Image (cartoon, rainbow, N blue to C red):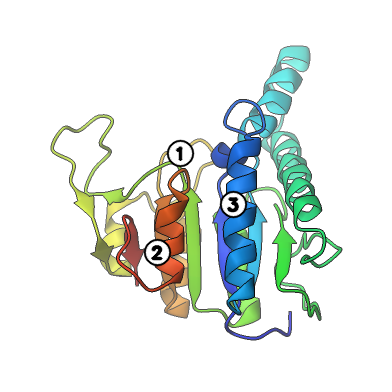
Amino acid sequence: MKQSPERIIVSVGGSLIVPEAIDSDFISRFRALILHAVKQGSSFFIIAGGGKTARHYQDAARDARGDLPRDDLDWLGIHATRLNAHLLRTVFKEQAHPRIIKDPSEEVTAKEPVLLGAGWRPGQSTDFCAVTAAKTLGAKRLVNLSNIDHVYTADPRTNADAKPIDSINWSEFRALIPRKWDPGMSAPFDPIAAKEADELKMEVAIMNGEHLEEFENYLSDKPFTGTVIS
């Protein structure tokens, strides 16, 4: 992807796009924010997660057949991310590149201010896709929009002493999370993607996409609620 380094990578968690049903209110608010930023001169590579769409298809396959190979379940999840990416591409139709980027290592010439991407291949998360896209683009900033406000010192769901972290370096962050990635793991960022981002000296900002004003603050270089890893 031969693009300007100003393009910002945005990984949109599937839990925001399809928490249970499709969240059209979130999509509408996200669209308005991105279009405003585009008018200010920003450009984006947006990668969609699978959300409950992926879970529903995977559960249906398990119910019908029983145990399935991991790759088969991964492909269902990948196609769910592609469906969600197509939804976003449709709502950004006038501003978006017409083709969804399925391989983030692919060089694509695109003049449009918005690129849409999705899952790539089995065994890799959309976090990894986002970091790979950043590497291809030469981008140094990646925003991870999920359903958590911060990275914490421990899992706040199981540890009452867990404290939010505003900023952390990669070495410290990677010590907080598992070394290996598993699709069912609970971690704010894929460990394999974290290792790659560390080597690329990237800045990754993790914030709650339900509070899009925080994303807007980040884009405007204002204080925001979230965690910066660098």
Residue 94 lies, in percent from the top left, at 82, 64
Residue shown at 67% from the left, 36% from the top: 70
Q: Amino acid at mark 2?
A: Asn
Residue at image mark 3: 30
Residue 49 visible (yes or no):
no
Residue 15 lies, in percent from the top left, at 55, 37
Label 2 sits on a secondary structure element that is: helix
Residue 22 lies, in percent from the top left, at 67, 32
Q: Quadrant of residue 89?
A: bottom right
Task: Using the numbered discs, state the Cα–Cα distance from disc 1 to disc 2 in whole angstroms.
Answer: 29 Å
- For discs 1 and 3, the disc positioned in front in the rendered view: 3
Residue 134 visible (yes or no):
yes
70 and 96: which one is in front? 96
Residue 204 lies, in percent from the top left, at 43, 66
Q: Please state, as top left, top right, bottom left or bottom right, where the C terminus lies in the image.
A: bottom left
Residue at image mark 2: 217
Is 95 placed above or below 200 here? Answer: above
Residue at image mark 1: 185
Label 3 sits on a secondary structure element that is: helix
- Farthest-out residue, left: 161
Q: Amino acid at mark 1?
A: Met
Task: Using the numbered discs, state the Cα–Cα distance from disc 2 to disc 3 in whole angstroms.
Answer: 14 Å
Residue shown at 38% from the left, 74% from the top: 221
Q: Please state, as top left, top right, bottom left or bottom right, where the N terminus lies in the image.
A: bottom right
Question: From the viewer's perspective, is 26 left or right of 195?
Answer: right
Question: From the viewer's perspective, is 75 left or right of 194?
Answer: right
Instruction: Work out whether mark 2 precedes mark 3 in sequence or the reverse, and give the earlier one.
Output: 3
Is 141 placed above or below 211 here? Answer: below
Is 190 placed above or below 40 here? Answer: above
